[in-house]
Image (tube, helix red, strand yellow):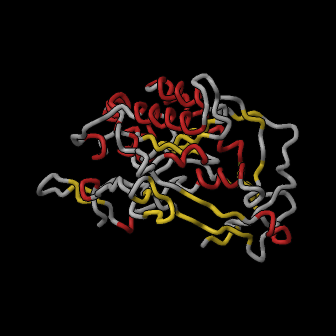
């Protein structure tokens, strides 16, 4: 059984220091990113273009507590890398939003929503993130962020009744006259639009804040486990999730979307002409019949 949320400790201070960067008499502390070298394997259709397609993927993971006042300073700039990011991903937990949690309680008896939990307004964290990006990127208050923003709505296995769709379609589509597949952008953007509509009904300020910050916003539902934790019938307390029951739902899609749209050809896709709010509109210039990729196609290290 995996440990529950109460067993997780979040360390805000970065563990790595930069010995060559000093502020006064002490070295600056910078968070350590996750680095992945991604390059086409031998059977990838773009293997001949490996030098142009290969990427070094740099991922930073910031806890919501990193955006509290005083958590980012000159000696520990734990969030200033956001201004340099090519893509921003913000995790929004519907079960922690008081309005969405109340609606879920009326439609499901999942232990993740029926048990007591301290809810919070996550849009406050998002606004703080936006303020820091604007400040460190030199953007004025009315200037749009030119890079994409992906709002990841977690725990889809709990709140799926809110969109009336328990099973999400495959994000892949077969390519005509080819043994490869491509990321199906019409499917992804259709799901994005459906999730956006749901979120607008219960948390319109979150949708407005996201779309007021960037013109390229996606709303992607995910579930890391695909199942709910079990309850001990003797004590009524949450035990955790059985590893055998884990079946993630669309957990890979945010990163696949990032690599497909902005990864330089690592994961080609069937394209659509997208509107501001993530709706899927057919693109007459779609390359769905010419675009190919293996599944999976990249070796990651």
- Nearest the eye: 192 or 81: 81
Q: Where is residue 94 in the image (x, y as percent from the top left)?
A: 40, 38
- Nearest the eye: 13 or 284: 13
- Nearest the eye: 297 or 235: 297
The reply to whether residue 182 is in sight is yes
Q: Give the quadrant of the C terminus.
A: bottom right
The residue lying at 66 percent from left, 40 percent from top is: 147
The residue lying at 87 percent from left, 55 percent from top is: 290
The residue lying at 43 percent from left, 63 percent from top is: 17
Compared to 290, does 102 lie above or below? above
Q: Farthest residue to the bottom: give it.
A: 42
Task: Describe residue 273's horizontal placement relative to residue 255 as left or right.
Answer: right
Q: Where is residue 119 in the image (x, y as percent from the top left)?
A: 29, 35
Task: Describe residue 293's horizontal placement relative to residue 3 as left or right.
Answer: right
Count of labels in the image:
0
- Nearest the eye: 220 or 133: 133
Q: Where is residue 222 in the image (x, y as percent from the top left)?
A: 50, 49
The reply to whether residue 45 is in sight is no
Task: Describe residue 222's horizontal placement relative to residue 279 as left or right.
Answer: left
Q: Farthest residue to the front: give it.
A: 24
The quarter of the picture where residue 53 lies is bottom right
The quarter of the picture where residue 108 lies is top left
Q: Give the quadrant of the N terminus.
A: bottom left
Q: Position of residue 170 (x, y in %)?
A: 63, 53
């Amino acid at each position: 059984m995996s440990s529950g949320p109460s067993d997780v400790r979040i360390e805000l201070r970065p563990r790595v220091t930069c010995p060559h960067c000093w502020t006064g008499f002490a070295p600056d502390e910078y968070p350590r990113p996750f680095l992945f070298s991604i390059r086409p394997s031998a059977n990838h259709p773009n293997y001949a273009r490996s030098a142009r397609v290969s990427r070094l993927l740099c991922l930073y993971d910031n806890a919501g507590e990193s955006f509290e006042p005083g958590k980012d300073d000159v000696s520990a700039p734990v969030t200033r890398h956001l201004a340099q990011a090519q893509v921003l991903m913000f995790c929004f937990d519907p079960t922690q939003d008081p309005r969405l949690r109340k609606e879920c309680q009326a439609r499901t008896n999942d232990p993740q929503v029926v048990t007591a939990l301290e809810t919070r307004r996550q849009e406050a964290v998002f606004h703080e993130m936006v303020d820091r990006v604007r400040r460190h990127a030199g953007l004025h208050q009315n200037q749009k962020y030119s890079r994409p923003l992906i709002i990841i709505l977690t725990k889809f296995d709990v709140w799926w009744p809110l969109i009336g769709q328990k099973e999400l379609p495959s994000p892949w589509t077969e390519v005509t006259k080819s043994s490869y597949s491509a990321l199906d952008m019409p499917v992804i953007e259709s799901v994005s639009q459906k999730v956006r509509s749901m979120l607008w009904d219960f948390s319109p300020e979150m949708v407005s804040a996201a779309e007021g910050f960037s013109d390229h916003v996606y709303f992607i539902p995910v579930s890391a486990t695909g199942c709910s934790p079990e309850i001990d019938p003797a004590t009524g307390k949450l035990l955790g999730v059985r590893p055998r029951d884990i079946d993630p739902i669309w957990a890979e899609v945010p990163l696949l979307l990032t690599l497909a749209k902005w990864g330089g050809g690592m994961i080609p896709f069937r394209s659509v002409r997208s509107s501001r709010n993530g709706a899927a509109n057919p693109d007459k210039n779609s390359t769905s019949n010419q675009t190919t990729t293996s599944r999976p196609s990249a070796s990651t290290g």
